[in-house]
Image (cartoon, helix red, strand yellow):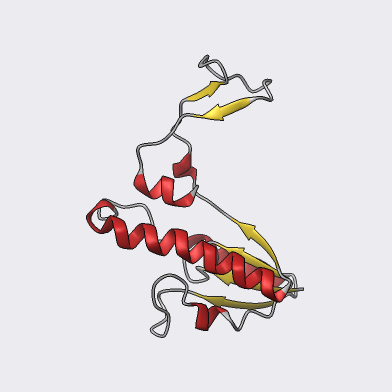
Amino acid sequence: MKLFITGSAGFVGSYAVKAALARGWEVDGIDLRHPSVNRQMDARLLSRIEADVVLHLAAFSSNAGFADRMAENYANNVMGTWNVLRLAQQSGARVLYASSSAVYSGDLLDDYGRPWRRDQENSMLVPTNSHYARSKL
């Protein structure tokens, strides 16, 4: 199995790299912590995707500074995901996209605005006020 991980040096990404290598998989990755990587998952760098599966974890993370550079951060997270999906499709790789627990506002309601119970299949999440979470949806 060949696995390509975006955000490979991040908190979750570093664990994913270790787990995949322990299973004997071939692993390649990309991360902003590497000096040759720029924002929005540069299509030129991603064009080297040669994998069976792409694990897309990369994003500017949730922090107080997200709103200070909102346009840039949205562009990175949304267009970065777009570039990953487009290039994976071109290469024939499957994509596993990991979002963030930040997308859950904590208040779950059913389709009628009533509190959600675990035994209900039809439910929806209350929209979040977190710009980071919105960029990860």
Q: Position of residue 108 (x, y in %)?
A: 51, 25
Which residue sits at x=46%, y=77%?
42
Q: Position of residue 101 (x, y in %)?
A: 49, 44
Quadrant in the rendering for residue 65: bottom left
- Residue 12 horizontal side relative to residue 69, left or right: right
Q: Position of residue 118 (x, y in %)?
A: 64, 23
- State the quadrant of the N terminus: bottom right
Which residue sits at x=50%, y=47%?
137
- Residue 89 horizontal side relative to residue 84, left or right: right
* Whether residue 59 can be seen here: no
Which residue sits at x=56%, y=76%?
29
Which residue sits at x=60%, y=84%?
48
- Residue 113 horizontal side relative to residue 134, left or right: right
Relative height, residue 66 to residue 94 (above, below):
above
Q: Residue furthest left?
A: 68
Relative height, residue 11 to residue 126 (above, below):
below
Q: Position of residue 93 (x, y in %)?
A: 71, 70
Q: Nearer the viewer, residue 25 or 6?
A: 6
Relative height, residue 73 to residue 31 (above, below):
above
* Whether residue 99 can be seen here: yes
In this rendering, the count of numbered labels is: 0
